[in-house]
Image (cartoon, rainbow, N blue to C red):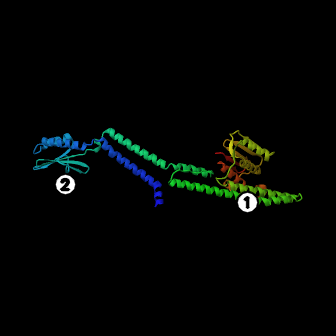
Amino acid sequence: MKKLTHKISSSLFTRLLVIFAFTAFLIGALFFFGTKIFLPEDLGHKTLNILDHYVALIKEDLGSPPDIDKAKRIVKKLGVDMSIQGPGISWQSGGMILPDPKRFKKHQDKELYFCHFKKQAYLKTISGDYEIYFKHTAPFSKFVPTYAKVIIVCLALFIFFLSYKTVRWLFKPIEQLRMAAQKIGAGDLNQKIDLKRSDEFSELASSINDMSEQIQKMLEGKKQMLLAISHELRTPMTRAKLACEMLSDNNYKKSIVQDLSEMETLISEILESERLNTKHAPLNKSIIDLKSLILVILEQYFKGERIVLKLDDIDEIEVDETRYKFLIKNLIENALRYKKQEVRVTLSTSGVEVSDDGIGIEPAEIPKLIEPFYRVDLSRERKTGGYGIGLYLCHLIATAHGHRLTINSDIGKGTSVKVCFR
């Protein structure tokens, strides 16, 4: 029972219900006490005395029996409907319809009878053998002063404003939850949501925190598994390389060493692609000069190659230097593999572009180039390329940095691959 009571009291639905009910109560109380304050306490009594005196003057003016001509003048002057019923007289103005006589109730010791019928106020008085009826609609608001109406409306608006602010406070955690979910989705698994309240939002925050923790554990397990696989695969390959060193130098030895090197590169690329194939891939970012990095890559790996440079001076950029170095190196290697005469490397504020003047690629093949192990040349011969994982890995590296890899190609003119910063 205690648990159920706590659940109900901490429920958003219950709190909203209380807010709306309290608002309705305050509005009702405002109008009730407003009329009590701004209307005189003896208004009803005074009004009744005035009305009784006024009706007596009208009866005296009408005479006995009532004079119909005088009644018409009174109707025209006062703007009310009147009816006179009695011996030899049955007259009413403006097609006035009388309610059932049983509806009329006498007011205390006064010779006045009141009735409400079809949203109209009726009054009946007795003059000898005659019954005189009056009908008039007098809105209640006419008794309330204008300044009082303004005050009541302002107070009502203030109550609604307080209710609005209360509801806003009640749902304020939604923005906090949204921002935290965005950070977690972007890879910040250390992001925790701290809501010091007891309702459904705090329960949701706790669930998100638990989910983030579980994802972190899963990724850590994946990381450990990749390290173990890397170790288990590289150990026998290292032994094979050492064994090759014991062989005499010949073409067979060179071929075996080259195959082992390609297998080692392939394993490294596969493991790296698995690390990056998630939004939560860890990047060791630092501020670097991309132009200097490109020059270092060219000096270290492509010295003597025919590469045309167009490198603008751009602002330093925050990237994972090791992975970006691999990305640019891989793009240049691909371009050199398919070029006819030269490769062009362009750096601008929009990104890095590497292009060749080779045979080009069919438009239908371009979207498939960033798929793992896809090769345009299905023969997979060594002289025509690797194993189809290079561009896929480049795509993952660019995406992990929030960048975009675009490929454009014209048959017979060449292919350009660009890493767009935005």
- On screen, residue 325 versus residue 198, left or right, reads right
Mark 1 residue element: helix
Picture coordinates of residue 69, whole percent (x, y): 13, 42
The residue nearer to you, when weighing 102 against 309, is 102
Real-space Cα distance between discs 1 and 2?
A: 100 Å
Q: Which residue type does callout 2 highlight?
A: Lys
Mark 2 residue element: helix
Picture coordinates of residue 31, whole percent (x, y): 34, 45
Q: Which residue type does callout 1 highlight?
A: Ile
- On screen, residue 212 versus residue 239, left or right, reads left
Q: Is residue 388 above or below residue 28?
A: below
Tell me what residue is drawn at x 37 percent, y 49 percent.
25
Count of marks placed on residues: 2
- On screen, residue 120 versus residue 199, left or right, reads left
Sooner in the amino-acid sequence: mark 1 or mark 2? 2
- On screen, residue 96 versus residue 313, left or right, reads left
Q: Residue 304 has which mark? A: none
10 Å crowding of disc 1: few (<14), some (14-19), many (20+):
some
Q: Residue 102 has which mark? A: 2
Q: Is residue 90 visible?
A: no
Picture coordinates of residue 422, whole percent (x, y): 64, 45
The reply to whether dot 1 and dot 2 touch (C-beta < 8 Å) is no
Tell me what residue is drawn at x 40 percent, y 48 percent.
23
Q: Is residue 253 visible?
A: yes
The residue tagged 1 is 229
The residue nearer to you, when weighing 305 against 118, is 118
Q: Is residue 312 above or below residue 7?
A: above
Direction right: furthest residue? 248
Q: For residue 297, which quarter of the picture?
A: top right
Tell me what residue is drawn at x 32 percent, y 46 percent.
32
